[in-house]
Amino acid sequence: MEGARLIAIELGYDHISTLHFFLSDCKNERKDSIRNFSFRTEEDFKTFYQAQRVGDSSIFIDTLPITMEAERTIYKAIKIRDKLKEKQVRPCHLFLAATQLPESHIYSMLEPKQELFQRLENFYIRNDTIKKL
C-alpha cells in the first residue's frame, strides 16, 4: 500500500487504485512480479509507467483515499488468501482478484482477456508463489 501511495503521488493522482498496486509491484525485482507477466521488456514497462502520469508530483499529500474498485479488489484478495490458507494478503492475491473484476484497472490493462485469471494463476504457480486454487 505504501508503494502504491507513493506512486500515485509521484504521478499526480489524488487517489489510489489498482493501477497503483500494479505499478508498485512492477517496480520490484522479484521473479514473480506482475511486470514479468505483463511486459516483455523493461523499456515497455518504463514507457507504460510514464504514460500514466496525470499531473505534477506533490510533497504536500499525506494520505490518499482508495477507489471503490481498489476496495473491491482488496476484499476479493482476502477471499483468495483465505482459500489458499495463507496468513497475509500478498500482491499475487490482489492481482488474481483484480483479474476477476472487470471494473478494475488491472483487468482493463491486461490482454488478452481470455482465460486471464488462469494464465496469471499459472504464472504464480510456476514461480512457486502459490499453490493451485
Image (cartoon, helix red, strand yellow):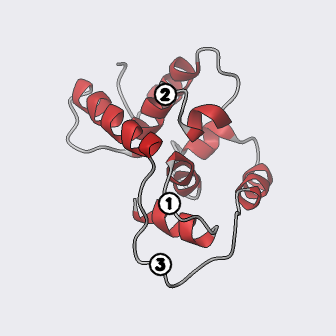
Residue 107 appears at what percent x and percent y?
58, 32
Residue 101's label in the rendered image is 2
Q: Alpha-carbon distance for marks 2 and 1? A: 19 Å
What is the three-letter code of the residue carrying label 2? Leu
Determine the secondary structure under disc 1.
loop
| Residue 93 against residue 6 in the figure, above or below | above
Q: Quadrant of the C terminus?
A: top left
Q: Alpha-carbon distance for marks 3 and 2? A: 29 Å
Q: Quadrant of the N terminus?
A: bottom left
Write down the residue under mark 3. 61
| Residue 86 against residue 47 in the figure, above or below | above
Closer to the N terminus: mark 2 or mark 1? Answer: 1
Q: Residues within 10 Å of mark 3 (few under 14, many from 20)?
A: few
- Mark 2 or 1: in front is 1
What is the three-letter code of the residue carrying label 3? Ile
Which of 33 and 19 lies nearest the eye of the viewer?
Answer: 19
**Picture residue at 46% right of the left edge, 40% below the top:** 69
**Picture residue at 37% right of the left edge, 44% below the top:** 71
